[in-house]
């Protein structure tokens, strides 16, 4: 069994760093072969961009530096379960796995200064059925519109 705790704790430390910088408390790390290769924290307020969530910042960095074949063997660890939009971004980036420390529900219920998460609440593999809606089937790069204004 893998030990996710050190990587989850690093993501949580990044979330605390984001708060210290004046942003919302979210952090993410990308791991390959047991080594952290990228780190990102939330920059919504300091970056003046509402899409600068930690997971999205990490996905952007990963896409700039690595191809999808490399990312397929990586795990993204995040301090909090991402919303559907960023779960989709993680999926389309090709990152093979995601582990979240705290559920979105728990963060909404508890104050951040009291949240202590150590065990993963969610482990998601691209090859397995996903609770957040990732498809079980292989990714298809080309989509064909059969109705609507783009048909």
Image (spheres, grey):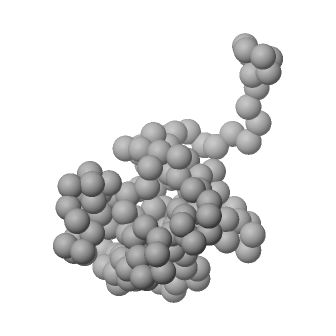
- Horizontal and vertical percent for residue 148? 73, 14
Q: Nearer the viewer, residue 95 or 83?
A: 83
Q: Nearer the viewer, residue 71 or 110?
A: 110
| Between 105 and 97, the one nearer to me in the picture | 105
Looking at the image, residue 127 sits to the left or right of residue 148; the answer is left
Image quadrant for the N terminus? bottom left
User: Could you tell me which residue is drawn at 42 percent across and 82 percent down?
Assistant: 20
Instruction: Kindly identify the residue that appears in the image at 24 percent across and 74 percent down.
Output: 113
Quarter of the image for residue 112 reads bottom left
Q: Is residue 69 visible?
A: no
Residue 110 image position (x, y, % from top left): 20, 61
- Up the image or down, 141 lies above or below 52; here it is above
Across and down, in percent, residue 28 comes to 48, 72
Q: Nearer the viewer, residue 26 or 146?
A: 26
For the image, the number of numbered tags is: 0
Look at 52% across and 84% down and name the residue there. Answer: 36
Looking at this rendering, what residue extends furthest in the top direction? 147
Q: Is residue 112 above or below residue 39?
A: above
Can residue 137 be seen in the rendering of this structure?
yes
Quadrant occupied by the C terminus: top right
Residue appearing at x 47%, y 71% in the figure: 23
Left or right: where 28 falls relative to 48: left
33 lies above or below 59: below
In percent of width and height, residue 95 lies at: 58, 62
């Amino acid at each position: 069994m893998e030990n996710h705790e050190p990587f989850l704790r690093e993501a949580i430390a990044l979330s605390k760093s984001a708060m210290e910088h004046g942003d919302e408390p979210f952090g993410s790390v990308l791991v390959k072969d047991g080594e952290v290769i990228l780190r990102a924290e939330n920059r919504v307020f300091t970056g003046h961009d509402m899409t600068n969530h930690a997971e999205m910042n990490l996905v952007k960095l990963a896409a700039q530096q690595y191809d999808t074949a490399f990312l397929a063997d990586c795990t993204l660890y995040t301090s909090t379960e991402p919303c559907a939009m960023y779960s989709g971004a993680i999926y389309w980036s090709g990152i093979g796995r995601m582990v979240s420390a705290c559920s979105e529900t728990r963060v909404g219920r508890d104050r951040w200064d009291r949240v202590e998460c150590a065990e993963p609440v969610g482990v998601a593999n691209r090859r397995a059925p996903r609770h957040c809606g990732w498809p079980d089937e292989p990714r298809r790069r080309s989509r064909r519109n059969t109705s609507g204004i783009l048909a």
